[in-house]
């Protein structure tokens, strides 16, 4: 089957060795600990041979097709008790639930509404797990909470789950687009017309989450988008975006030589600009291999 369409663009599902993805995390120059966590994983369908008298070299190669790609970032809420644990628990819980929902990957074609339900449920289970962990551990008046931004790619679609203000950006054809919406009080007031964009950026409410895993309210937002081989994906915590502008991120992504190179460059630029918060980011793209 041809891997290109009539315009010469690659259309088939990327093979595992055609996925270039990398992630980094750093505590920055100011924080005493790193409360960020990130995770990159793939879900496969495995066939395990338990018994056979056919020599291994004569067996038909078994299909170990990749069903989905996952990437997540979580930012423990600013210095509160257990922020580091909250972000780890959120990712572990979401990953466990996603891995045990494999029947959806087998039956779906990437457009199944069940994917949306699974992603919403993954976020809500993470929320419940963090709140359960916080009982009897967190001191009165403090918070054990975290953001969660999750990417799930089921070719040719991908889904995003957003809780909090960690972001997902898509870079394509020279344009950087922030797809997720920050779930902060300042953004809420901006959307309501109470704040201007400048007021929202300068307000102390810009760092106050209106929705968070483990917080008073968790309102996961799921977005479904069509992917192609020209997309570059970026997930990041606000330790990156408070120091590196969208314009500069676009320049780096527009000239990247690999996801690793771009991750390390953006991390270094955030550190050089002050590194006042924990910094985590994941960059992913597809790279066609020569036939």
Image (tube, rainbow, N blue to C red):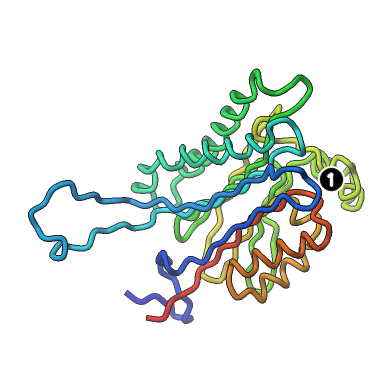
| Residue 138 left/right relative to 205 | left
Picture layout, residue 2 above or below residue 247: below
Q: Residue furthest front?
A: 32
| Residue 210 left/right relative to 10 | right
Q: Hey, which quadrant is residue 220 in on the image?
A: top right
Place of residue 30 in the rendered image (x, y in percent of width and height, measured from the top left): 81, 48
Residue located 65% across and 18% down the image: 136
Place of residue 267 in the rendered image (x, y in percent of width and height, measured from the top left): 71, 61
Picture layout, residue 287 above or below residue 215: below
Q: Which one is nearer the viewer's eye here, 201 or 21? A: 21
Q: How many marks?
A: 1
Circle 1 crowding by C-alpha within 10 Å: few under 14, some 14–19, many from 20: some
Place of residue 135 in the rendered image (x, y in percent of width and height, measured from the top left): 64, 20
| Residue 169 left/right relative to 114 | right
The secondary element bearing badge 1 is classed as helix
Name the residue beneath numbered marker 1: 190
Split into 4 quadrants, where in the image is the N terminus? bottom left
Q: Which one is nearer the viewer's eye here, 213 or 176? A: 213
Q: Hey, which quadrant is residue 89 in on the image?
A: top right
Split into 4 quadrants, where in the image is the C terminus? bottom left
Q: Hey, which quadrant is residue 139 in on the image?
A: top right
Q: Which one is nearer the viewer's eye here, 16 or 151? A: 16
Place of residue 218 in the rendered image (x, y in percent of width and height, measured from the top left): 66, 33
| Residue 33 left/right relative to 116 | right
């Amino acid at each position: 089957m041809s891997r290109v369409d009539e315009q010469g663009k690659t259309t088939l599902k990327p093979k595992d060795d055609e996925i270039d993805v990398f992630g980094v995390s750093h505590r920055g120059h100011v924080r005493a600990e790193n409360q960020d966590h990130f995770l990159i994983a793939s879900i496969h369908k495995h066939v395990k041979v338990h018994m056979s008298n056919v020599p291994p070299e004569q067996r038909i190669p078994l299909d170990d097709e990749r069903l989905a790609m996952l990437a997540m970032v979580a930012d423990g809420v600013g210095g509160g008790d257990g922020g580091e644990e909250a972000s780890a628990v959120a990712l572990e819980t979401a990953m466990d639930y996603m891995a045990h929902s494999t029947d959806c990957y087998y039956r779906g074609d990437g457009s199944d509404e069940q994917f949306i339900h699974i992603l919403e449920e993954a976020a809500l289970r993470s929320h419940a797990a963090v709140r359960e962990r916080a009982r009897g551990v967190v001191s009165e008046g403090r918070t054990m909470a975290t953001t969660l931004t999750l990417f799930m790619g089921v070719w040719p679609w991908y889904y995003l789950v957003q809780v909090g203000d960690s972001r997902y950006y898509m870079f394509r054809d020279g344009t950087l687009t922030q797809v997720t919406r920050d779930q902060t009080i300042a953004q809420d007031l901006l959307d309501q017309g109470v704040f201007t964009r400048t007021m929202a950026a300068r307000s102390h409410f810009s760092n106050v989450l209106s929705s968070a895993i483990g917080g008073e309210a968790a309102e996961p937002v799921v977005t479904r988008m069509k992917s192609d081989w020209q997309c570059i994906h970026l997930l990041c915590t606000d330790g990156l975006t408070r120091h590196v502008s969208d314009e500069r991120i676009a320049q780096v992504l527009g000239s990247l030589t690999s996801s690793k190179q771009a991750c390390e460059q953006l991390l270094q630029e955030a550190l050089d600009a002050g590194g006042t918060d924990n910094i985590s980011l994941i960059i992913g793209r597809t790279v066609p291999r020569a036939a």
